[in-house]
Image (spheres, rainbow, N blue to C red):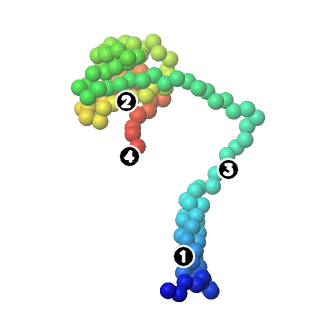
Amino acid sequence: MDERPFDTINVIPFVDVMLVLLTIVLTTSTFIASGRIPVHLPKAAQSAHEVQESRVIEVTVDGVIHFNGKPETAAALKADLASVARETPFLIRADKEVSLQRFVDVVDILKQLNFTKVAVQTESH
């Protein structure tokens, strides 16, 4: 057998692959850069970052409402929330299988008592 080292290396396939990779990188980087809306935010000498703990209201699959870790009826929840400050943020954690009416009951109680900082916790795909 004739085993001798290569005299030359064919670099054309390597250059082709590098050009394809360069094209992919440039294409995706322009999509990423142009996807933003330019906003120049105002500056302030001091920014107030208020950390306030959210109160959690949970609705289980069987429709039981939990506030502060204890099960409550809708009337008891309304009575408990009457003494809470109106600026308090609330996080609603409702099971995806719970009836819509039970969820609306909780949201309606918060609305009747004029709570405006209400969020619903979801999971990402």
Q: Residue at position x 61%, y 27% from top?
A: 50
SS state under label 3: loop
SS state under label 4: loop
Q: Foreground: 93 or 83? A: 93
Q: Confirm or deny contact between disc 2 and disc 4 (CB under 8 A).
A: no
Disc 4 crowd, CA 10 A, few/some/many (<14, 14-19, 20+): few
Disc 3 crowd, CA 10 A, few/some/many (<14, 14-19, 20+): few
> Which mark is in front, 2 or 1?
1
**CA separation in Å, label 4 and label 1:** 34 Å
Q: Residue at position x 39%, y 39% from top?
A: 123
SS state under label 1: helix
Quarter occupied by residue 57 = top left
Q: Which of the labelled discs sits on residue 109, or is there none?
A: none
Q: Residue at position x 58%, y 56% from top?
A: 36
> Which mark is in front, 3 or 4?
4
User: Where is mark 2, residue-wise?
Assistant: 93
Q: Earlier in the sequence, mark 2 or mark 4?
A: 2
Q: Confirm or deny contact between disc 4 and disc 1 (CB under 8 A).
A: no
User: Where is mark 1, residue-wise?
Assistant: 17
> Which mark is in front, 1 or 3?
1
